[in-house]
Image (tube, rainbow, N blue to C red):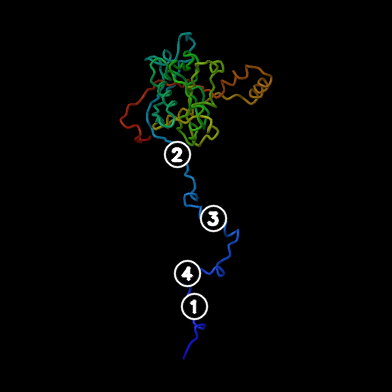
Amino acid sequence: MILSLSSLPSAPLHHRPNLSSAIPLTRRSFLFSTVTATTTPAALSLPLPPPPPDTTITDRVFMDFSICPNYFRPDRTLSDDLSTLCSGDEADSAPIGRLVLGLYGRLVPLTVSNFKSMCTNPNSSYKYTLVNKIFPGQYFLAGRQGRRDKGEVRPPLTLERNTETVDPRAFELKHSRAGIISLCLSENDDDEKIKMDPDYRNVEFLITTGPGPCPQLDNKNIVFGTVLEGLDVVTAIASIPTYKPSERIRQFNDLAEFLGDDRAQNARAMWSRPLKTVYISDCGELKVSNPTLSPSLP
């Protein structure tokens, strides 16, 4: 049988796709192919969360708290202060106990350095100064500035100015439990005249007493440490009774403040003060080889 050449399939001259059978290229498919080609796994990955605050304990200090029964004795002279009234064999001071505090020197180095200086300076320290306010179930304040004969602090002139008070990173930690140490900013009750001094250095601090958190302090005060030992001492200080004005006195005070009477603020300075003379009888630095090690908690 003889086949004609016209009946045989013709061989392709070159390999080329049949454009008539290809998928038609529309604008939508072109845009989709462009996005697919330019989108890489790196572009799809989410940004990494910021690292947590560095709460490495770099330093340890101690504070001894006591109650002085002689602070308001009638024969007291103007030259007497806590060092003469509440120390010695005849003082009859009642010790409450010792706190061991761990400080976050990597997170807020300036705040920690100033606090440590106030615990170790032989001439101007927290020693023989009062716990000036107690808020039961929340925190207590210490380190108020003023006159030494009134149990208040006089910081040394060499204390460094704390620029961390305007650094947002210094406010990351929260007052989430008992035993948090914080530099007082929003709760600071130093006299306005003292704050107007060009050499003013804020050294007032607070310690949360629990049992719950204090969210009203968050983002307003600088957390710089924690109580490592002595939470029972914190609880004992928090249980000391304080002066609480009656509702009628509060109403009169609000009215006086509304009328611009400066005596209203002076009167409020007495609110929440402990009815017993609680003071820091001693303080200093604890020299340990590795301050980051966890201590044995009480």
Return the x and y of residue 168 as percentages of the image width and height: 51, 32
Return the x and y of residue 121 as percentages of the image width and height: 39, 18
- For image coordinates 67% across by 18% down, the residue present is 260
Judging by the rendered image, the residue that carries numbered circle 4 is: 15
Q: Earlier in the sequence, mark 2 or mark 1?
A: 1
Real-space Cα distance between discs 1 and 3?
Answer: 39 Å
Real-space Cα distance between discs 4 and 3?
Answer: 27 Å
Q: Indicate which disc residue 28 carries.
A: none
Amino acid type at image mark 4: His
Real-space Cα distance between discs 2 and 1?
Answer: 74 Å
Q: Indicate which disc residue 52 carries.
A: 2
Q: Quadrant of residue 116?
A: top left
Closer to the eye: label 2 or 4: 4
- For image coordinates 45% across by 13% down, the residue present is 81
Real-space Cα distance between discs 1 and 4?
Answer: 13 Å
Q: Are marks 3 and 2 in contact (CB under 8 Å)?
A: no
Judging by the rendered image, the residue that carries numbered circle 3 is: 34
Q: Earlier in the sequence, mark 1 or mark 4?
A: 1
- Above-or-below relation of 185 to 210: above
Determine the residue located farthest toward the bottom in the rendered image.
1
In the foreground, 189 or 289: 289
Return the x and y of residue 271 as percentages of the image width and height: 57, 23
Closer to the eye: label 3 or 2: 3
Amino acid type at image mark 2: Pro
